[in-house]
Amino acid sequence: MKLNIKSCLVAGMFSLTMASCSLLGPIDDIHPENVLDDETVITDARSAEIAVNGIYEGWRAKSSIYNALFLRTGVMQSSSVSGARSFLTGDIQDDNVIVEETYIFLYYIINQANSVLAALDKDIKGRSEEENLNYQREAKFNRAMANFMLLRLYGEFCNMDSQYGIVLHDAPVRDNTPKARATVRQCYTSILDDLKEAEVLPVKHSSLGTVAMYYGNYLSAKALKAKVLLSMGNFDEAYKLADEVITKGADEGIMLEPVYGDIFSSFQSTDLLFYPYTMNNQQTVAGYRYDWSAGAGNTLRKIAALYPEDKRYAWAFDAENMISSYRMNKYQMNDNVDKVPGNSLYMLRLSEMYLVKAEAAIRKPAPDFTAAREALRPITDRAGFAADFVDNVADKDMLMTVFYQKYLELFGENFEDWFDMIRYNKLDGTDWVALGYVNSWTRLALPIPRSAIAGNDLLVQNP
């Protein structure tokens, strides 16, 4: 594999700073010939840049988990993705192809980040010490995001005292050495440690002078940290950090788009805090987007019906003004087909920070409903609600209102609604089955893939 890596480097097969050759194998099938050679692959500034950009490329490698969870939360009506229907029924087994594929691709990103970190632990020709450190911080940002996603998918992320975390790796995997799962608390500590280092990353700019939010930076690191703190139950700090991202984002030109649809019309939307770059068909993430042709799921339609004035749902499925070949207007990525330079992987948005801030304000030890309403107001104003909408919501109804608004704001993007459902159930006892929003309430944590357990005798299955 060393020769293949070097060929990729020499041939320059990384378009617009995105890697186009895979450098690592699956986490359960990694052998010495399939991994980065830490001594030879990164030798100068250019090869360092290519290796770091290869981490970002990993986010667009697989996408089946998206539609599977869109089915589970009622966002999507149906899916042709193999294994997705099991998510709708809750009968998710440890040999489900989506369960295994997602597990592997997230550990791929972690292993790529760890390989880059190992390779950068030296002076790099043509790069200053600070530039080298920033590359390491970018790797740690991506590692934190992958670990957080793994924890929320495969661990008991809402229980700080649970032993069912994930397997943590802080060095490249070179063999099949067995390793046990870390506790949930240990997982959060590792994630926060990585984000603490990433919080000093400067915002990069493109050659045109626009902010390049397809790279990790201090805003995306703090935004991710706010979400982590919300999941941990540290609502005071989640509130403060979300507010800081909103405030400091404005200084960098990151602010809410005045028109909701404009978020999705260009990969340079001011609402985006982190989105791996793409052009044309350089990803498989878009491969399953044609599932939207069946229309919105039952839950999405039910929640949208609660708010007939809402513009977001109506815009996304406006048949008369459909601009996306995927039949859902949030997905305009394929500029070869749709002739618009869109983006289709919305991993962190500024809008979400307003919603994190609103929920955290209510859940704080000293609830602040006024602050929650003011955080929610810009979101509902843009969505077409009356100016006094949030003022007329009773305190007792505010949490569910925040949930509904977040669901309508982010549906079909990053499956955050599933994690919100778990949190609301654990903290408030919300019965989503009784509400008719999900079909089952089993397998809240996905099973660890059978193949992973077979190769690691210290790995314990979820209960």
Image (spheres, rainbow, N blue to C red):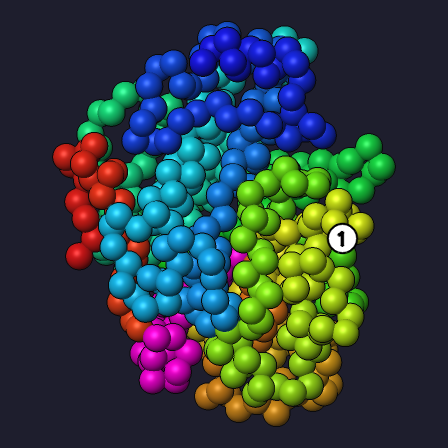
Give the quadrant of the C terminus: bottom left
Q: Is residue 426 magenta?
A: yes
Left or right: residue 393 compared with residue 105: right
Question: Where in the figure is residue 304, as x and y percent of width and height?
Answer: 58, 81
Which residue extends farthest right? 208
Residue 127 visible in the displayed image:
no
Question: Where in the figure is residue 443, as x and y percent of width and height?
Answer: 27, 62
Residue at 37% of width from left, 49% of height from top? 98
> In the figure, 140 relative to 161: above or below?
above
**Which of the pair 361/294 is nearer the observer?**
294
Residue at 38% of width from left, 14% of height from top? 33
Residue at 79% of width from left, 51% of height from top? 340
Q: Which amino acid type corresponds to the residue marked 1 in the rendered image? A: Asp
Left or right: residue 452 compared with residue 65: left
Residue 71 visible in the displayed image:
yes
Give the quadrant of the N terminus: top left
**Which of the pair 67/294 is nearer the observer?**
294
Q: Which residues are magenta?
A: 414-439
Question: Where in the figure is residue 426, as x and y percent of width and height?
Answer: 31, 71
Mark 1 Cα-neighbour bin, 10 Å: few <14, some 14–19, many ≥20 = some
Which residue extends farthest left? 457
**Which of the pair 47/235 is nearer the observer?**
47
> In the figure, 280 relative to 417: above or below?
above
Residue bearing mark 1:
338
Question: Where in the figure is residue 280, as x and y percent of width and height?
Answer: 70, 41
Left or right: residue 171 compared with residue 16: left
Residue at 28% of width from left, 39% of height from top? 167
> In the figure, 240 relative to 379: above or below?
above
Q: Secondary structure at mark 1?
A: helix
